[in-house]
Image: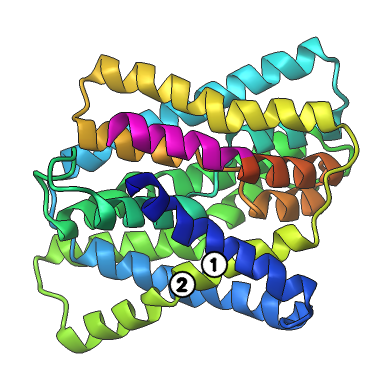
Amino acid sequence: MYVVNTLAPVFLIIILGVLLQKTSFLSPQLSRESNRLVYWVGLPCLLFNETANVSIASGSALRVSVVLVVGCLGCIILAYLISRLLHLSGPSEGAFVQAAFRGNLAYIGLPVVSYAISQAPGTSAVASLSGEQLQSLAVLSFAPLVPLYNAMAVLVLVTGSHRSQANPWLTLLRSVVTNPLLLACVLGLGWTVTGLPLPPWLGNTCQTIGQMSLPLALLGIGVSLATTRVRGQVALSMLATLLKVAGAPILGVLVANWMGLSATERTIALLYLACPTAVASYIMAEQLGGDETLTSSTIVLSTLLSTVVLAIILSAFY
């Protein structure tokens, strides 16, 4: 029941989003505005509040981050090798590589980890840490991936695109420094460095706003999936899906065991690595000349397959 109790809230809310879109209960405009609210306000408040109240040793989060970064870079290398073997065109190669490494950490990974923490039995791997410590670990672990994902997505798409880019490095820099999730983490960690406690009025406000972000984000994913179709090179999309939700966790297990991560650290890393391809990948592919059809198909397929892989990870390690 633990696996069901952890994953059901996440994917049932996504399914609800699909149904609300299919029945026209939510208008496309409302969905876009909701997603913008989550991205620019809700999640930044959540991340700022968690990082400003960090209550774990930074070394633990750093170890998990290293596993995530290695898993990400490993998927990029494998995806490029496969794309060259298959002789993919530039736009298809960029979209394939991005879909194979860019996970939906904030919108799906964080809710899954949060529910896993709240539902974990007393004898599980997380029993030695308090809920606040685990939430801090969950947030700080993926914070370094925010700028990495944005930077690498711009690089692989611009490199493969046939569109003219006057200054791709400026595009890369802008995508990183204007990311609200990254800025929220930096501000939160900056507050932690001062050693000052977060004023209750500010902490409570950020916590209240942040609490709305995860369910709204999951609803938004459902709405996006409802309007996304699996089409084009389905076999190639499935290959990118396998790299993302299966290849990345396998790399993560190898690196985590080599580094000697604790059971808690390893499980959090694997849950993040098994996340499906981020919905934002489609927007990036559209803007930077990648294969939009390949990207959209991979988002749908990886979301479906990730439920199985996440369930396996929770069963095996918790």
Question: How many other residues sit within 10 Å of disc 2, few (<14), some (14-19) or many (≥20)?
Answer: many
Mark 1: secondary structure: helix
Is 284 covered by the magenta stretch?
no
> Pointer 2 and pointer 1: residues touching (CB < 8 Å)?
yes
Q: From what the image shows, is residue 65 above or below residue 165?
A: above
Q: From what the image shows, is residue 238 above or below residue 59?
A: above
> Disc 2 marks which amino acid?
Ser
Q: From what the image shows, is residue 316 above or below residue 108?
A: above
Magenta range: 305-318
Which residue is disc 1 drawn over? 217
User: Looking at the figure, which quarter contains the C terminus?
Assistant: top left
Mark 2: secondary structure: helix
Real-space CA distance between mark 2 and mark 1, rounded to the nearest whole angstrom: 6 Å
Tell me if 64 is positioned left or right of 159 in this view: left
The percent position of residue 74, horizontal first and vertical second, equals 52, 21
- The image shows a total of numbered marks equal to 2
Q: Residue at x 65, y 63 (%)?
A: 222
- In the current view of this chain or complex, which residue is farthest to the top? 85
Is 315 covered by the magenta stretch?
yes
Which residue is disc 2 drawn over? 213
